[in-house]
C-alpha cells in the first residue's frame, strides 16, 4: 500500500522552534543565533558585546561537542550561561535549545545569544526559535568563505567579518567578500569588526540594539 | 553530518505512520529534499539505515528527490530560479529573496505492508 504523505521531516524540530520563539516573545527576550566556523571568534565577540550592552541583561546558550570552556569564559560576563554539549552532533536542535531555555530564568533578560556549534553547513538547516541569525566569518579563514558556504550566509540577518585587525597581516581581498555577499544576500548588513581592538564594535552594538527595539518597542534600547 | 538528525526525524515520522496504518513493514520511502538543506543522498541513506534498525522501516528503500530553488525578490516581486550560490534578481539585481521552494525536506510517500499482508502500490 502506497500512502501519499507530504509532511515536513523537520516538522517536529520546527514545531519546537516555534514554541521556543513564543516563550522568548512572552518574556520579551531577543534571541540571536550566532553561526560560523570554529575559531571565527564567536565567544570573544560575546565577551566584548555583553558588558557593552549593560545595563541590558544577557543570557547565553553555548553549543559545543565537548567541554564547558566557552561557558566558563562567558560566565564571567553574562547573567546566565548554559553549556549544551552535543556529543557528536554538529549543530544545535530546537529541542536542545528548549532544554537550555528550561535552565534559564528568562524574565528580566533582554538578549539571549545562542552560540551554535562551530560549523558552516549543518547549523543553517535547523530553526532554533531565534529571532535573528548572524553569520560570522573571520579574516584568517580566507576571503572565499561566503562563496563556499552560501547556505550559511543566504538566510543571515547580519553578516559579521571578524578579526579585521589581521587585514594588514594576511593576504585578504575584502572586495571578494563584498562581491560574494552582493550575489547571495543584500538584505543583511555586512559589519567589519575586531573584538580584540574594539574596531567596528559600535556598529554591531547599534545593530543589536535596533533589533531589540524592533522586537519590543515598549522597551527602549539601553 | 546533519543527515543523522534528519534520518532520526524521518524514522520517528515513519514509526508514527506505521502505527496509524497498522503496517508491519515499510518497504519504500520517498523524500523530497530542497537543495538548500544540503543533504547528500548517500549520507542520508547511510544514516537512515542506522536509524531505522529495529523499526518497521528497517530495510526500506529510500529515494531522495532533489528540489531546486525558487525565489521571489523582496524588492520587486519577480519570481525566478535561484542557484545555491546566486540569488540575484534578474530584474532589479538585488539579492534579497523569499524562498518559495528548495528549503524543505518533505516525506512524500510511504509504501507499506499491512497486517493483512495486502501490498500494492
Image: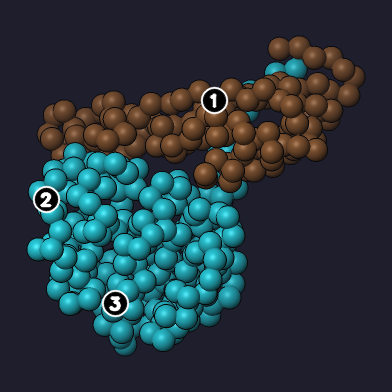
Chain colours: A cyan, B brown
Residue nearer the viewer, A69 or A136: A69
Residue occupied by mark 1: B64
> How many residues crowd around disc 1 within 10 Å: few (fewer than 14), some, or many (20 or more)?
many
What's the chain of the residue with tag 2?
A
Residue occupied by mark 2: A173
User: Going 29% across and 41% down the picture, which residue do you hit?
Assistant: A148
Residue occupied by mark 3: A49
- Position of A84 relative to B103 (above/below): below
Q: Quadrant of the C terminus of chain B?
A: top right
Relative to A80, A30 lies left or right: left
Cβ atoms under marks 1 and 2 closer than 8 Å? no
Q: CA distance from mark 3 to mark 2?
A: 27 Å
Which mark is nearer the camera, 3 or 2?
2
Considering the numbered disc 1 on the image, is that residue within a helix, a strand or a loop? strand
What's the chain of the residue with tag 3?
A
Considering the numbered disc 3 on the image, is that residue within a helix, a strand or a loop? helix
**Where does the image place residue B12, in percent across and percent down from the top left?**
69, 42
Q: Is residue A157 visible?
A: no
**Where does the image place residue B71, in percent across and percent down from the top left?**
30, 32
Q: CA distance from mark 1 to mark 3?
A: 43 Å
- Position of A34 relative to A78 (above/below): above
> How many residues crowd around disc 3 within 10 Å: few (fewer than 14), some, or many (20 or more)?
many
> How many residues crowd around disc 2 within 10 Å: few (fewer than 14), some, or many (20 or more)?
few
Cβ atoms under marks 3 and 2 closer than 8 Å? no
User: Going 22% across and 52% down the picture, which residue do you hit?
Assistant: A142
What's the chain of the residue with tag 1?
B
Amino acid at each position: 500500500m502506497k500512502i501519499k504523505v507530504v509532511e515536513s521531516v523537520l516538522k517536529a524540530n520546527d514545531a519546537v522552534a516555534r514554541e521556543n520563539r513564543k516563550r522568548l516573545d512572552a518574556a520579551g527576550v531577543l534571541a540571536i543565533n550566532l553561526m560560523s566556523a570554529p575559531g571565527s571568534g564567536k565567544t570573544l565577540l560575546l565577551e566584548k558585546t555583553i558588558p557593552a550592552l549593560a545595563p541590558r541583561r544577557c543570557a547565553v546558550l553555548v553549543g559545543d561537542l565537548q567541554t564547558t570552556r566557552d561557558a566558563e569564559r562567558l560566565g564571567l560576563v553574562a547573567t546566565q550561561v548554559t553549556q549544551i554539549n552535543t556529543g557528536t552532533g554538529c549543530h544545535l536542535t530546537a529541542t536542545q535549545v528548549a532544554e537550555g531555555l528550561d535552565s534559564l530564568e528568562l524574565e528580566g533578560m533582554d538578549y539571549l545569544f545562542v552560540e551554535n556549534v562551530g560549523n558552516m553547513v549543518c547549523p543553517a538547516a535547523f530553526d532554533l526559535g531565534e529571532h535573528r541569525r548572524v553569520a560570522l566569518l573571520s579574516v584568517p579563514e580566507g576571503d572565499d568563505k561566503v562563496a563556499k558556504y552560501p547556505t550559511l550566509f543566504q538566510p543571515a540577518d547580519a553578516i559579521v567579518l571578524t578579526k579585521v585587525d589581521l587585514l594588514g597581516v594576511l593576504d585578504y581581498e575584502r572586495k571578494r567578500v563584498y562581491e560574494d555577499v552582493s550575489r547571495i544576500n543584500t538584505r543583511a548588513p555586512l559589519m567589519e569588526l575586531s573584538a580584540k581592538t574594539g574596531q567596528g564594535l559600535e556598529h554591531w552594538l547599534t545593530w543589536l540594539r535596533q533589533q531589540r527595539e524592533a522586537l519590543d518597542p515598549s522597551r527602549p534600547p539601553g | 553530518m546533519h543527515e543523522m538528525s534528519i534520518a532520526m526525524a524521518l524514522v520517528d515520522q515513519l514509526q508514527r505512520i506505521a502505527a496509524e496504518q497498522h503496517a508491519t513493514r515499510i518497504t519504500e520511502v520517498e523524500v523530497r529534499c530542497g537543495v538548500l538543506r544540503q543533504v547528500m543522498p548517500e549520507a542520508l541513506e547511510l544514516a537512515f539505515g542506522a536509524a531505522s534498525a529495529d523499526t518497521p522501516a528497517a530495510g526500506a528503500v529510500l529515494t531522495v528527490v532533489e528540489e531546486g530553488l525558487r525565489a521571489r525578490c523582496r524588492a520587486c516581486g519577480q519570481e525566478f530560479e535561484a542557484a545555491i550560490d546566486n540569488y540575484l534578481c534578474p530584474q532589479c539585481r538585488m539579492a534579497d529573496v523569499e524562498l518559495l521552494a528548495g528549503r524543505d525536506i518533505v516525506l512524500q510517500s510511504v509504501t507499506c505492508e499491512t497486517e493483512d499482508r495486502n501490498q500494492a502500490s
